[in-house]
Amino acid sequence: MKQIVFLLMLTGCLVGQAQTKEELEKRRREIQQEIASLQETQNQVSKDRKASLSELKLLERKLRSRYAVIDNLNDEIRLIDNTIFSNNREIYRLERQLDTLRKQYAKTIQYAYKNRSNYDMLNFIFTATNFNDAVKRVAYLKSYRKYRDEQVVGINRTQKELGQRIEMLSVNKSEKSKVIEEQQKQKELLESEKKEKNQFVSKLKARENEIAREVAAKKKVLRSLQNSIAAIIKREIEAARRKAEEEARKSAATATTTRAATGPAETPTAARKVTVLENTPEVTKVSVGFENNRGNLPWPVDRGTITSSFGRQRIEGTRIEEDNSGITIQTESGTTVKAVYDGVVTTVYDVAGSQTVTIKHGKYFTTYFNLSSVNVSKGSKVETGQTIGRAGENFDGDGEIIFMVNEELRFVNPELWLKRR
């Protein structure tokens, strides 16, 4: 019974590990697909003879993805090592168990050999002191014979388990060899990509002054965009505040009349703290829905690569710094740009010659900048995945949009809200 329980536990453990291995392999395939997509985008960008920031960002993301593949393979090797250790330990236990069973069986065989004649068996029975004692001796002999049979079954079962474990160990070692081989291949690709990046940084450094002017121009445009977004949100907050104050005055007047007639009313306790922008249950529902989809919002374009991340970063090999309040997504020029969640278009406006759309989702706002055309208008209700415009081009002539997310006036990292590809 104990052996059966052990086998069930062992089977469950191995199934759990197999699932984990499958998850690692699935994640590795996803990262490798991302690398292939980055390479494809880089091939398109590198058609431009100039060394551009977009291409550098692609090279950097490709390197990060390559490191992620190697880390993934390290995790798989650790998983296989744990399985090998477990199998080695179980083989040792089974070998000891088999040795013990064989010794016990040898003793029973020796005893049976010494008492092998039918006369000895009959003599053992007939020398009983009474009938009950004789019955017990017959039962003992049957039990002894059954015990010997069970010993044979136990030895055969243990031998089979041992053989299976040895076979599993061989498979584990073979798997580990393949993973180590793949890891070595990925490390060689990593070294090659590092050299490619270093060579590119040298080319980029030769254009540092020109790139500095490009970055300065971009910063100026982004400041203008940030100011526009802040002004839009402030107007929304102010309008919501005025509306809330007006409704509060009306409610106070109504409450005074009601209390005079029926007495004081109970004050409800809200389960979730709402802001002034969440002035109706419907709007609050949109906010909550947006929050619940953090990390699972669809991308604003079907195919795209993040070339500039949120926050401050130094451009390698130069003294130039970027400070982004959104993310830059490289895509094909003219590709469809879609709303990432249900909402209402607050404004369609122009920033530095590029059309821009800001959509309100309760207390959250998403902004889509650098559109070549727009399909929506102020006040339009939009749904998740609805087309709002087309992607424009950047300084280098590559397709690109800038995507921003605000929680009221605070800019937050959009990458944390989009689903992982």
Image (tube, rainbow, N blue to C red):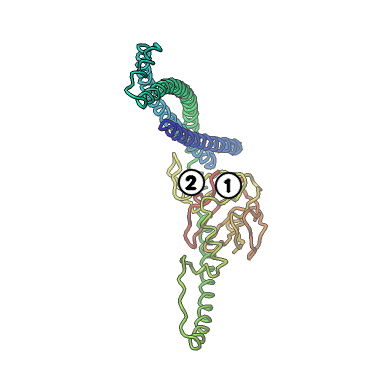
| Residues marked 2 and 1 touching at CB (< 8 Å) | no
Q: Amino acid at mark 1?
A: Phe
- Residue 395: assigned label: 1
Q: Is residue 119 above or below residue 241?
A: above
Type of residue at label 2? Ala
Indicate the position of residue 301 as horizontal and vertical percent values. 61, 48
User: Image quadrant for the C terminus?
Assistant: top right
Nearer the observer, 238 or 138: 138
User: Which element type, helix, strand or loop, lies under badge 2?
Assistant: helix
**Residue most extreme to the bottom:** 260
Give how far across and how far down residue 369 sits, in percent: 58, 54
Please determine whether, in this image, residue 112 is positioned above or below residue 301.
above
Task: State the CA–CA distance, disc 2 to disc 1.
Answer: 13 Å
Label 2 crowd (10 A; few <14 / some 14-19 / many >=20): some
Q: Nearer the viewer, mark 2 or mark 1?
A: 1
Judged from this view, the residue extending furthest toward the front is 130
Residue 208 visible to the viewer: yes
Of labels 2 and 1, earlier in sequence is: 2
Could you say which is closer to the camera, residue 168 or residue 378? 168
Q: Residue at x 55, y 63 (%)?
A: 285
Location of residue 289 in the rendering, given as x and y in whole percent from the top left corner:
55, 59
Residue topped by disc 2: 212
Figure quadrant of residue 397: top right
